[in-house]
């Protein structure tokens, strides 16, 4: 393949492209290439191969997901008091970070480099200018797909707020760099610098900037959220919080409601705005019939497919999880025909929290007060079942990820919880807890909640009709559940009635209450009396 002129970067341009990074160009630098150029460079460098439809297919080696245990935050005087230190945010001394940074900068100097200048945040008042420096064309394409691509006139004189030094093949040394393994994701909020080393998994790029937004925006009176968002015909915004497997992407993808974004948003005085300019969808067992938009976007030129398997002709097999169950597709959001390309919407009218309760004891939908919404936001509950993760046995396992995104929170969870509670109260949003999990028994006994029932209940919640029906209080969880909704069997609305063995339901409900109570102890000291009053507690 002959090199195209667009990849040639004059020395002066290369210096400008690396300004603020601490890296000096010794070899070619490919600056702000568009998708065709990045695909061409990726193929030239044998980084990946094309699918039959033109998507670039890559393998990420031993790292097929995020390396949560290898994430560090630099312990700096200006920020240390506000960081939520612990298992999520592990301390790295400034001295060790300086060593790691210097070694990665020296390594990058000897490589061909690809740079991308991009935005995070569709609201100009709260966006972050990001400069990525990486050694691989496909990671540059991933970032270009995921973040917001500035217009050409904004690139002249682009000055980054944050720099990402991305060295996927550089091996960190724990003894020298003060990290845990050969992999390191290290963030300095003071230096506004991120170092990613020793992992090819591209999600680290995306989530490192999400962590930055989670740090930056609360100080600007904007709540950063790990949620999807869509827009009704009257301009009403709905937010969908939920961990993997709860239906966040499926339920927010509605032909009648344009998609604002599928994963990361901010909520402030100007309404809701997407942080991203693309989507990063999990595609294992993706069906053309069930999710046609994501399926079509993943079969297009310019998409990046991580660890997806194909036959010798490049035809995708989205059921093959031989490399990982966490197969991924990354594409720009305009590949979704029903997307709101401004990435912005007004004040939310509905806040939906999704859980896949494999214990089968939570109702399919319940209305939450503002205090209950904060409690469930801080709890971030769902349940895992066999087949979703290695090592899980036959029994469901409760999972609590505070704010539905604990791995990306640099501040204490109560900071985000209090902001959510205040925003809900200020704008009068209705709040809902939706269970997309099991009914009539736990996993292995009952059945998965019928998607037609979930969609019908959700439509009723979003159009305002559900708020007008009669509700009753659930005795175990304190939730307000509708007594009758047209088209939905009454026994479906009350989970205890769907169980043949009522005593078994009571035992299972009490067990889940116990786990909620145990988890609440981790953040109880940081919440107000209103949240403590609605906390789920075991009966005396």
Image (spheres, rainbow, N blue to C red):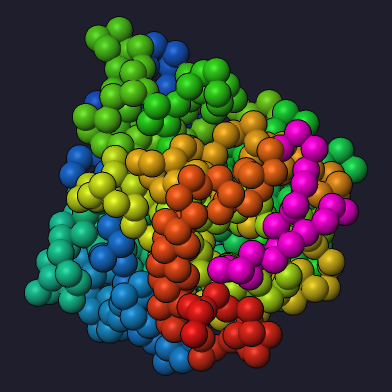
Residue drawn at point x = 69 percent, y = 44 percent = 490
Q: Give the quadrant of the N terminus.
A: top left
Q: Which residues are magenta?
A: 467-488
Confirm whether the magenta stretch covers residue 470.
Answer: yes
Residue drawn at point x = 56 percent, y = 68 percent = 476
Confirm whether the magenta stretch covers residue 355.
Answer: no
| Image x and y of residue 467, in percent | 83, 55
Residue 6 vertical position relative to residue 518 in the rendered view, above or below: above
- The residue closer to the viewer here, 443 or 109, is 443
- The residue closer to the viewer here, 243 or 66, is 243
Residue 293 vertical position relative to residue 366 in the rendered view, above or below: above
Describe residue 452's horizontal placement relative to residue 89 as left or right. Answer: right
| Res 43 seen here | no
| Res 307 seen here | yes
Quadrant in which residue 527 is drawn? bottom right
- The residue closer to the viewer here, 212 or 46, is 212
């Amino acid at each position: 393949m002959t090199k195209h002129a667009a990849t040639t970067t004059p020395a002066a341009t290369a210096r400008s492209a690396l300004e603020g990074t601490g890296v000096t160009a010794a070899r070619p630098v490919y600056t702000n290439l568009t998708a065709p150029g990045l695909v061409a460079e990726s193929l030239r460098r044998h980084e990946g191969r094309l699918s039959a439809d033109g998507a670039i297919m890559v393998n990420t080696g031993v790292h097929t997901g995020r390396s949560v245990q290898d994430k560090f935050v630099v312990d700096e005087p200006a920020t240390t008091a506000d960081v939520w230190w612990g298992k999520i945010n592990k301390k790295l001394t400034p001295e060790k970070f300086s060593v790691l940074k210097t070694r990665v900068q020296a390594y990058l100097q000897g490589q061909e480099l690809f740079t991308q200048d991009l935005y995070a945040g569709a609201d100009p008042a709260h966006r972050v200018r990001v400069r990525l420096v990486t050694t691989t064309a496909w990671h540059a394409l991933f970032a270009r797909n995921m973040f917001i691509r500035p217009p050409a006139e904004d690139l002249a004189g682009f000055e980054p707020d944050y720099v990402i030094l991305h060295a996927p093949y550089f091996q960190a040394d724990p003894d020298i760099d003060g990290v845990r393994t050969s992999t390191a994701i290290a963030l300095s909020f003071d230096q506004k610098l991120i170092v990613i080393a020793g992992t090819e998994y591209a999600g680290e790029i995306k989530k490192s900037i999400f962590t930055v937004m989670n740090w930056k925006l609360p100080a600007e009176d904007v709540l950063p959220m790990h949620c999807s968002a869509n827009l009704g015909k009257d301009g009403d915004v709905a937010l969908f919080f939920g961990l993997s497997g709860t239906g966040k992407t499926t339920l927010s993808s509605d032909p009648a409601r344009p998609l604002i974004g599928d994963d990361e948003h901010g909520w402030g005085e100007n309404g809701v705005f997407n942080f991203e300019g693309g989507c990063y969808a999990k595609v294992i067992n993706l069906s053309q019939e069930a999710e046609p938009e994501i399926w079509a976007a993943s079969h297009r030129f310019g998409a990046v497919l991580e660890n997806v398997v194909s036959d010798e002709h490049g035809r995708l097999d989205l059921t093959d999880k031989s490399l990982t169950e966490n197969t991924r597709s990354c594409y720009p959001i305009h590949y979704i025909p029903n997307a709101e390309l401004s990435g912005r919407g007004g004040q939310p009218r509905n806040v939906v929290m999704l859980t896949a309760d494999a214990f089968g004891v939570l109702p399919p939908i319940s209305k939450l007060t503002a205090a209950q919404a904060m409690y469930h936001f801080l709890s971030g509950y769902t349940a895992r079942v066999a087949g979703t993760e290695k090592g899980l046995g036959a029994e469901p396992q409760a999972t609590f990820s505070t704010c539905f995104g604990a791995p990306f929170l640099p501040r204490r969870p109560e900071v985000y919880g209090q902001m959510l509670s205040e925003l809900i109260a200020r704008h009068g949003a209705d709040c809902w807890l939706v269970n997309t999990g099991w009914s009539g028994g736990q996993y292995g006994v009952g059945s998965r909640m019928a998607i037609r029932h979930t969609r019908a209940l959700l439509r009723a919640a979003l159009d305002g009709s559900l708020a007008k029906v009669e509700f009753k209080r659930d005795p175990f969880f304190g939730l307000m559940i509708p007594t009758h909704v047209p088209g939905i069997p009454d026994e479906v609305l009350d989970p205890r009635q769907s169980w043949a063995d009522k005593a078994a339901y009571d035992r299972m409900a009490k067990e889940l209450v116990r786990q909620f109570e145990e988890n609440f102890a981790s953040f109880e000291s940081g919440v107000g009396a209103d949240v403590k009053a609605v906390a789920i507690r075991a009966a005396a």
